[in-house]
Image: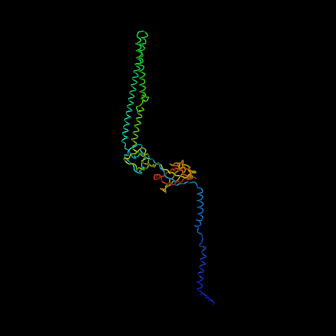
Amino acid sequence: MNARVKTPAPGEAEAAATPATEGTATAAAAPAARKRSPLRLVVMLAVPVLLAGGGAYFWLTGGRYVETDNAYVQQNKISISADVAGRIATVAVKENQLVKAGDVLFTLDPQSYEIALSQADAALATARVNVEQLRVAYSTALAKLDAARATLEIRQKEWERAANLQKQGISAESALDDARLALQQATSNVALEEQDVASATAALGGDPNIRTDDHPAVRAALAARDVAQRNLDKTTVLAPSDGIISQVGSLHVGQFVNVGSTIATLVETGEVWVEANFKETQLVGLKPGMPAEVTIDAFPGVKFEGEVASIGAATGAEFALIPAQNATGNWVKVTQRIPVNIAIEGEELGLLRAGMSAVVNVDTKPGT
């Protein structure tokens, strides 16, 4: 059966033609909307340039900076101990207290040392009196020597007269013997008195005009007195420098302290540095004086300027209490580390504490 085709009315023909016309217009406008924006072009050109610049920078600066995070803040630590033994009488500090050089830390009972000083003063006075007695003995010996020489002169003249009389036959031989005996006795007395003078001179240190305090015995007494005074002074323990006192938990009144026993620790605040443990493979070109940048983990926003102060003479393992013995059969190669001291400066140094972790970056090619 044949299909019948209905001819559209004039209005319907116009309605059917309108969608086709709109589709054609949209397709014509699409190419005009796909034009590339200038920003996209700039981004496409900038990325390769940035990559090339970054690559050139790392190529030029490659190996220039050496960095390690195996670094720690260091400060001098002084072990506080007493130079003399005794019981603690007073304690003047507390844990983590800031002290100045010369501040009193604690004192010991001074009674026994005051007694020792009194004994030393008495011994010194006795030594001075003994020296004065030696001066008197020297003067006495000189007087006896003068008397003996005068007697000898008289005996010599008597001998000469007796000898002349005997030659003339006026006196007997026995009278001459008496004069000879008296002369010999006078000569012996002079010799004995000379020995006494020499002994008195030696007792005065070989110098009869020596000052009393220059005499060896007095100098020894003075030294003993100085030791006693020093021991008494050492019963007051002072801070040797500025710093923070810590580990004072063993300081108690009445506790007995032995000589040299550590009872507290003073961490000096005047000097601060960083000890950076670089790998041995990082030391190529590293020299003292090179600039460094230090950051502390506790203060991430603060950077400290510094420089390499010194490079360790050996690895840390060499200074260990029990160094590793690589001669054994169980040897495993481990990259060693060398301690490098970094001197730092900055207004915030007072905030640093010994043992804080740090990161050190050293510029091995300064000025380039």
Can you say whether 171 is above or below 2 in the image?
A: above
Can you say whether 283 is above or below 165 in the image?
A: below
Whole-percent x, y for residue 194 in the image: 42, 23
Relative to 299, 123 lies left or right:
left
Can you say whether 234 is above or below 282 in the image?
A: above
From this viewpoint, which residue is outermost toward the right?
2
Relative to 116, 15 lies left or right:
right
Q: How many numbered marks are there?
A: 0
Whole-percent x, y for residue 276 in the image: 52, 52
From this viewpoint, which residue is outermost toward the bottom?
1
From this viewpoint, which residue is outermost toward the front?
329
Relative to 10, 302 lies left or right:
left
Whole-percent x, y for residue 69 in the image: 52, 55
Whole-percent x, y for residue 333 in the image: 56, 53
**Looking at the figure, which quarter contains the N terminus?**
bottom right
The residue closer to the viewer here, 62 or 179, is 179
The residue closer to the viewer here, 206 or 84, is 84
Q: Quadrant of residue 29?
A: bottom right
Relative to 278, 188 lies left or right:
left
The residue closer to the viewer here, 164 or 171, is 171
The residue closer to the viewer here, 38 or 225, is 225
